[in-house]
Amino acid sequence: MLINKLTNQGKYVQFFKDIFNFMSRRRTAKKRVLLPDPLYSNKLIQMVVNQLMKNGKKSLAYRLFYDALNEIGAKTEQDPIKVVEQAIFNATPLVEVKARRIAGSTYQVPLDVNPERGTALAIRWILSSCRNRSGRDMVSKLKNEFLEAFEKKGNAIRKKDEMHKMAQANKAFAKYRI
């Protein structure tokens, strides 16, 4: 009876939103809009610079990354943006595993990765590999890591392959998907 009244008034959808919204303790986080970087107008570069930045020093992060791009362009004689995009694409995982507790046992359940999350993971892995490399200047470490990822080598690619192997080993638990 109540549902018929609400449907007639066109408030049916809002009624259910109000009913099921009280379950959430917090509001859903809004997706922040990422502006492209000023030099190349590329959002992917902006993502890399934001991850590279430490202590709010974005101008330093821009300088490091743009110097690395110039060195990549000089070494490969290709468009450095395309090289970086391909490197990130090569390091992007397609599946990941998440721990799921079922009947007292914890299973590693393989899940497909959202493309945005995959890109963010690839950038994070490449930059963490850069930071773990030995050497003095960050520009050469960035250049070497992006070139290795471009050639499907390096620590970031190893980490991606490791995650894929883990998902392959645990594919029997795919029935417990979240």
Image (cartoon, helix red, strand yellow):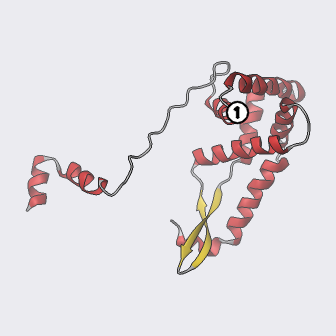
Q: Is residue 111 left or right of residue 140?
A: left
For disc 1, the marked residue is 54
Which residue: 77% across, 34% down?
A: 83
Spot occupied by residue 82 in the image (x, y as percentages of width and height): 74, 31
Above or below: residue 175 compared with residue 39: below
Q: How many marks?
A: 1
Spot occupied by residue 162 in the image (x, y as percentages of width and height): 76, 60
* Callout 1 crowding tier (Cα within 10 Å): few <14, some 14–19, many ≥20: few
Q: Nearer the viewer, residue 78 or 174?
A: 174
**Camera sees residue 49:** yes
Q: Residue furthest right?
A: 135
Above or below: residue 100 compared with residue 10: below
Q: Is residue 117 left or right of residue 72?
A: left
- The quarter holding residue 99 reads bottom right
The N terminus, quarter of image: bottom left
Spot occupied by residue 78 in the image (x, y as percentages of width and height): 82, 27
Which residue: 55% across, 73% down?
A: 101
Which residue: 8% across, 54% down?
A: 5
